[in-house]
Image (cartoon, rainbow, N blue to C red):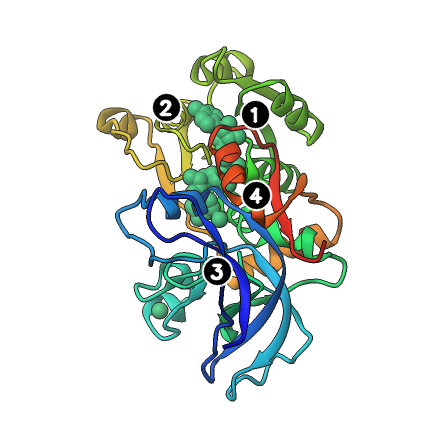
Amino acid sequence: MKAMKAAVAHAFNTPLTIDDVAIPTINDNEILVHIKASGVCHTDIHACHGDWPVKPKMPLIPGHEGVGVIVELGANVTHLKKGDRVGIPFLYTACGHCDYCLEGKETLCPDCQYTGYHMDGGYADYCRADANYVVKIPGALSFVEAAPLFCAGLTSYKALKVSRTKPGDWVSIVGVGGLGHLAIQYAISMGLNVVAVDTGEERRAQSLKLGATYFIDFKKEKPEDEIPALLGTGVHSAICTAVSKAGFESAYASVRRGGTLVLVGLPPDDIPVPIFDTVINGITLVGSIVGTRRDLEECLEFAAQGKIKTDIHIRKREDINQIFDDLEKGKITGRIVMDFES
Ligand code: NAD
Ligand code: ZN
Ligand code: ZN
């Protein structure tokens, strides 16, 4: 057996261990990627906790921001070559022939599978991937720079695309974490005005530096009161990435008549949707799940052109349990990337 190192979750709510495991074997439609860097998404914590109705495999190698170099190609793979730099996003695979896949909405495919969830992911030296669902990394981006874009960048970008906003509109970015601090930058690049909502001086400074017009500290002020005080009315759209039921309730109440709440964060608990207010105010609720390969190419291009820059903190894979703990406690600004080359 050829072995590699990986961070492995063996059961829900137990610490991960760094194990020697077999290097994955690939089928004819897959590739093997030598992982160079891997971002840490809050979703990885939800997976390891079994937070959601659909459970991941166990044991599990988490991670869906793994990027690296192709070292092996399945017999049917002709559009990629060894040495190509690619990332393996959350959407590991989809069926390719259902209504959604045919319409270019592969994230809605009922038969889709998720990386670092149904399939082992990027917290490993090597990761297998469906050749048709990886995306190439633009030459202008290093592995470390590219990693967080494969989920945090993609998801933020897509959420804004479905927010039914246009340049000049106001959006609130609720939750300025890994996703949110990139959402601010994509929003600014799209010509939107931003109200950022999170807590603490560090996130305030970061949000304003990234171009938000206002920052509201949800621990000190109620965004649903403060936003109308600042804008005269609610936002055209609220993008909620907060891992918090209260954050979603407040985001809902911050949207103006005719506006849109985009649900992105995935706290385990639900919010009751007020029927009367939603009807009378003509509110649209949109669920947004990662993004397609095309969205990913677009989102990477923004970064390749220097319009988006992730606030990256490099940590070691051996520290993964501490990283999870820090992320859960809100101690991390920007995104943690584990750099396997350093
Ligand atoms: P993160 O921990 O980096 O960021 C979450 C942020 O929310 C933190 O900055 C925290 O301080 C803030 N927050 C908490 N309560 C808040 C409140 N009441 N109001 C405003 N902000 C609040 O996490 P992340 O990696 O950015 O992921 C965020 C969420 O998005 C997770 O639940 C994750 O699973 C989910 N996610 C969804 C998709 C998708 O496709 N929909 C993709 C990736 C991640
Ligand atoms: Zn993610
Ligand atoms: Zn399909």
Q: Nearer the viewer, mark 2 or mark 3?
A: 3
Which residue matches tag 3? 121
- Label 4: state its secondary structure: helix
Q: Secondary structure at mark 3?
A: loop
How far apart are the two marked residues, 2 and 3, measured between alpha carbons? 31 Å
Pointer 2 with pointer 1, Cβ within 8 A: no
Residue 30 point in image, percent of width and height? 49, 77
Q: CA distance from mark 1 to mark 4?
A: 34 Å
- Alpha-carbon distance for marks 2 and 1? 17 Å
Residue type at the position of mark 4: Asp
Q: Which residue is mark 1?
A: 195
Q: Nearer the viewer, mark 2 or mark 1?
A: 2
Q: Position of residue 322 (x, y in %)?
A: 53, 37
The residue positioned 54% from the left and 84% from the top of the image is 77
Is ligand 1 within 8 Å of the beta carbon of the residue shown at mark 2? yes
Q: Which mark is on residue 319?
A: 4
Q: Is residue 302 left or right of residue 93?
A: right
Query: Which class describes the residues within 10 Å of circle 4: few (<14), some (14-19), or many (20+)?
Result: some
Q: In the image, what residue type sits under mark 2?
A: Ala
Distance between the Cα atoms at labels 4 and 2? Answer: 30 Å
Say whether disc 4 or disc 3 marks the residue closer to the N-terminus. Answer: 3
Earlier-in-chain disc, 1 versus 4: 1
- Identify the amino acid type marked 1: Val
Q: Earlier in the sequence, mark 2 or mark 3?
A: 3
Q: Which mark is residue 258?
A: none
